[in-house]
Image: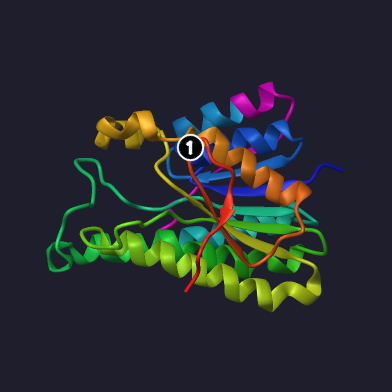
Amino acid sequence: MKKVAIITGASTGIGRETAIAFADAGYKTYLLARSADKLQSVKQEAEDLGGEAVSVVVDLASRAALKAAIEKILAAEARIDAIVNVAGIWHGAEGVYAGIDFDKFSPEVIADTYAVGLIAPSMLINGLLPKMGKGSSIINISGTFADGGKGWLPYYVSKRALEDLTVGLAQDVAERGIRVNCISPSDTATESYAKYFPQYMDSAQEPSEVARFAVELCDSSSASGKVFVIKKDMEPAEGFHA
């Protein structure tokens, strides 16, 4: 029986590469994102690798929609082996949410950023944990913040809180043999990063490297409760967690 992995933000960037990497590693993948067309493309690529993939079109900012997605997965699967929470909000259709004073953010952007970056992963894990057992793994994707959170505080808060969730949850499920880790990638050459920060692309790592490490943590590592920082041309290193 194939292992089963749930991946959020699977339509683009790190999420897309993660979906492909898990399919290539032999997992059946559930691909969660808003764009049906983009998910169909990822699903096809996963299936071309011999994997089985299921598209789940869902707005992760909607609790009702996420609840329905969780129920769909629970009804279909007897066991879940991996959850990879990739999705986050750091830009909109017209610009990046950086260099902005906190009181200039709209309430909607703040709420959606927290919903997608923290509430959705929390709900997904909470709902799917009953189907996870010894040897299964949860991977959260945060981000590096060398200069702190000034100018992009909603995203910073959502991802730092996700790291806190990682550390606390690892303690909570340790006796059940479930491993929980976080990957904190430095600049990563996604489509959106290329659009908004083209001047830094030469120093950005490939999203496939982040995806490869996520598979490695699930399949070949005994680590749990760790936050791993990964940068271009550098081996992953356990990061400081306050």
Whether residue 220 sits left or right of residue 84 in the image: it is right
Going 39% across and 64% down the picture, which residue do you hit? 158
Could you tell me residue 228's position as x and y percent? 56, 55
Residue 16 at x, y = what percent? 52, 36
Can residue 132 be seen in the rendering of this structure?
yes
x, y percent for residue 65: 48, 58
In what quadrant of the picture does the N terminus appear? top right
Quick one: 146 or 11, which is closer to the camera?
146
Kindly tell me whether residue 53 is visible in this rendering: no
Which portion, as a residue range, is magenta? Answer: 45-61
Left or right of 98, for residue 86: right
Q: What element carries label 1?
A: loop
Q: Name the residue under label 1.
A: 232
**Closest to the observer: 224 or 3?**
224
Amino acid at the residue labelled 1: Lys
Does the magenta run of residues contain 196?
A: no
Q: Quadrant of residue 46?
A: top right
Identify the residue at image location x=59%, y=76%.
168
| Image spot of residue 224 (x, y percent) | 69, 64
Q: Return the residue found at the far right.
A: 1
In the picture, measured across the screen, residue 147 lies left or right of residue 127, that is left
Residue that lies at the very extreme toward the top in this rendered image: 48
